Amino acid sequence: MQLSGAEITIRCLEEEGVEYIFGYPGGAVLFIYDALFQQDKVKHILVRHEQAALHAADAYARATGRPGVALVTSGPGVTNAVTGIATAYMDSIPMVVISGQVPTAAIGLDAFQEVDTVGITRPCVKHNFLVKRVEDLAETMKKAFYVATTGRPGPVLVDIPKDISQQVTDFLYPAQIEMRSYNPVVKGHPGLIRQAVQMLLEARRPMVYAGGGVVLGEASELLTRLVRELGVPCTNTLMGLGAYPATDPQFVGMLGMHGTYEANLSMQHCDVLLAVGARFDDRVIGNTRHFFVEGRRIIHIDIDPSSISKRVRVDVPIVGDVREVLQEMLKLVAETPQRLDPVALKQWWHQIGEWRARDCMHYERSDTLIKPQFVVETLYQVTGGDAIITSDVGQHQMWAAQYYKFDKPRRWLNSGGLGTMGFGLPAAMGAQLAFPDQVVACITGEASIQMCIQELSTCKQYHLPVKIINLNNRYLGMVRQWQQILHGNRYSESYMDALPDFVKLAESYGHVGIRVENPADVEGALREAFALKDRVVFLDFMTDPTENVFPMVKAGQGLTEMLLGAEDL
Amino acid sequence: MRHILSLLLENEAGALSRVAGLFSARGYNIESLTVAPTEDPTLSRMTIVTNGSAEVMEQITKQLNKLVDVVKVFDLNEGRHLERELMLVKIRAENGAREEIKRTADIFRGRIVDVTDKTYTIELTGPRDKLDAFLEALDPLMILETVRTGASGIGRGDWIMRA
Ligand SMILES: Cc1cc2nc3c(=O)[nH]c(=O)nc-3n(C[C@H](O)[C@H](O)[C@H](O)COP(=O)(O)OP(=O)(O)OC[C@H]3O[C@@H](n4cnc5c(N)ncnc54)[C@H](O)[C@@H]3O)c2cc1C
Ligand SMILES: Cc1ncc(C[n+]2csc(CCOP(=O)(O)OP(=O)(O)O)c2C)c(N)n1
Ligand SMILES: [Mg+2]
């Protein structure tokens, strides 16, 4: 059957089982929008800014594990999308981005709304394609989905010139695709896996450090089984939260710059470290030289060889899919009666218990000022710990990570690698579309929320009843905190003056707005908001403007050089 | 340390810029880069001369392998290999100097490929240090123009690199 390039594009999405596509129309994609109009299988969500289309598609992927899809026009459509593409790239999120391009004959002539999309996006995509012949379109789409979702996932962009979307050809969607230049390794090296298990079983101070790769690789259950079977402590990165249940006694909390005292000290002082789907980020292992003051042996499981021995040299590198490798490890553990030395392990837990007793997450409660930590703790209780939480970037993001205890993966959606303010609200939309019956809340700050506030309109149009938890401290709080600690209290441009009335703003979009000024009203307001199941509720919590995030490891310092509270400043 | 990397990559528009972009984005050095299609027109063979510590070379190799258009990467330093570069030099060659230049070219097995009454253009192939030595053997004031291709490399013996 002969179809136009535009029709082929949509048919490919159908073949891939794509439910939603997030986008914004324009000249170069008019044929594709026309094809969308004439079918009803793929549903289009019209956002209010292309950045939001990308974040929503990205969060859809984070929440479901299926690739997110976005559609933007050439030129400004693409440049607006770049922040969202880079956000997904840094966190290894599977996405397919379709962009319109000027007609092939006009490429290179500074045509209206022409940008070098492949060039602009090249450093922030896993791969990208410019389709030059309509005959190549279906196969290119197949490749895009294949590359985006296999190996280390990531965004893939397909740039389609307008004339290609208009030309017709036979449509045939390849059932499978092979690329000689792209063959991600899945199975880990059996010898190394054996060595890793032996090393773990002989450890006296073992530690498991699990990251986003465990979530991406759907391996939380396997990880949990292994950690419990061995009786060892486990920490998660910001991206890994939920990979291991936060309420489990073997969980020592998040590690890193704003990680717990016990997690960071266990990392520093363990003798065998198992790193799983985590990439030794600089916000996790601040100063690698300080990290190696203590000797330890490191096992590293990662599907991307370039994540291994990038910042930190490891002893047992295992390239492979975390599911496959953990399965093999569990098998080996089951085959041997050997377990870790119980005396040594008990001593280690005793030591960790002492570190825990520092109670680093303690904060001063107040009857007069709303403490942001208290809002998150109350949110956790009110939602039964079972909401999908998205966040923006700043102090509120860290408090969300620290005080909302994620027991399951894909419940915590945030921009860790790029740290993109503006992510939270569109992300909540993507998650709500994926799970219409789930409670979805966006923990944000008064600055971040304003970066994609226009999406309140999209929420209205598609009846997406997300709850916005605005921790309104009237400051670019995270910036203010660094200025206080590192720049002599010189608060350069970090006060958020002239804030809008968020309650009225929410109302003008047709939503409910609630301002909360007293600690005593926090729980009631939250309950009221969540009772309004089919409405967007914007909760504007006026929080303590001077509160800081602790513990804190200053950039470039060692993991154990932590500020634990205001008294350490 | 100086390393010479051999790559097979898809002969597609944009593949070169992915490789070049990777080097600039991650701050790796490129001393030279050559590329041309192979006997299989869908594949290009690229030789990159770079330098870095063992750790940096490990990352460069891994990052190159990660590029979807790259089929194979091999660090030729890991085995015995041949390295050749082509140079064209235009030299001021007037009156008395002509014989001397020709003799020097002969010693280096260079060939004079173009002549005017004032200049010689000499073609020379060899490993980098041979080309350097030739230039050093000439009076710098006589050198009018040099064009070098950068190194191409291939493994010695039976070892072959294929897709
Ligand atoms: C304000 C702010 C503060 C921050 N503070 C902290 C902090 O205190 N602590 C912290 O941890 N982070 C913090 N971050 C986040 C930090 O910047 C990084 O994003 C994060 O640490 C990276 O997490 P990760 O190591 O789990 O890697 P990810 O970015 O999640 O990468 C996943 C890894 O797993 C691999 N992988 C993917 N799929 C698979 C698979 N199937 N099998 C095997 N491997 C796979 C990938 O190749 C990659 O190496 C902060 C960010 C911000 C914005
Ligand atoms: C797009 C973007 N610009 C700038 C920054 C730098 N930045 C990180 S946190 C932050 C302040 C965020 O303020 P707010 O949203 O109010 O959160 P708070 O820290 O006060 O909780 C800024 C400006 C960023 N992460 N993203
Ligand atoms: Mg703020």
Image (cartoon, rainbow, N blue to C red):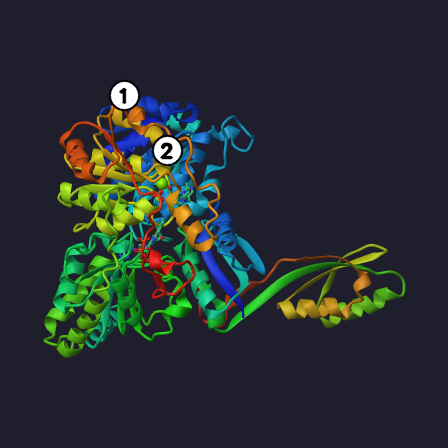
Q: Nearer the viewer, residue A388 or A76?
A: A388
Q: Quadrant of the N terminus of chain A?
A: top left
Residue at screen point 73% across, 59% down? B89
Location of residue A265 in the rendering, given as x and y in whole percent from the top left corner? 29, 67
Tell me the residue that label 2 is attached to.
A450
Q: Answer yes or no: is residue A481 visible.
A: yes
- Secondary structure of the residue carrying numbered label 2: helix
Q: Answer yes or no: is residue A17 visible.
A: no
For the image, the number of numbered tags is 2
Disc 2 sits on a residue from what chain? A
Q: Which image quadrant shows ligand 3?
A: top left
Q: Nearer the viewer, mark 1 or mark 2?
A: 2
Tell me the residue that label 1 is attached to.
A38
Q: Nearer the viewer, residue A298 or A178?
A: A298
Amino acid residing under circle 1: Gln
Q: Cα distance, mark 1 to mark 2?
A: 35 Å
Residue at screen point 35% across, 46% down? A546
**For the residue with label 1, is its CB less than 8 Å from the closest atom of ligand 1?**
no
Amino acid residing under circle 2: Gln
Location of residue A99 in the rendering, given as x and y in whole percent from the top left corner? 40, 33
Location of residue B44 in the rendering, given as x and y in whole percent from the top left corner? 48, 53
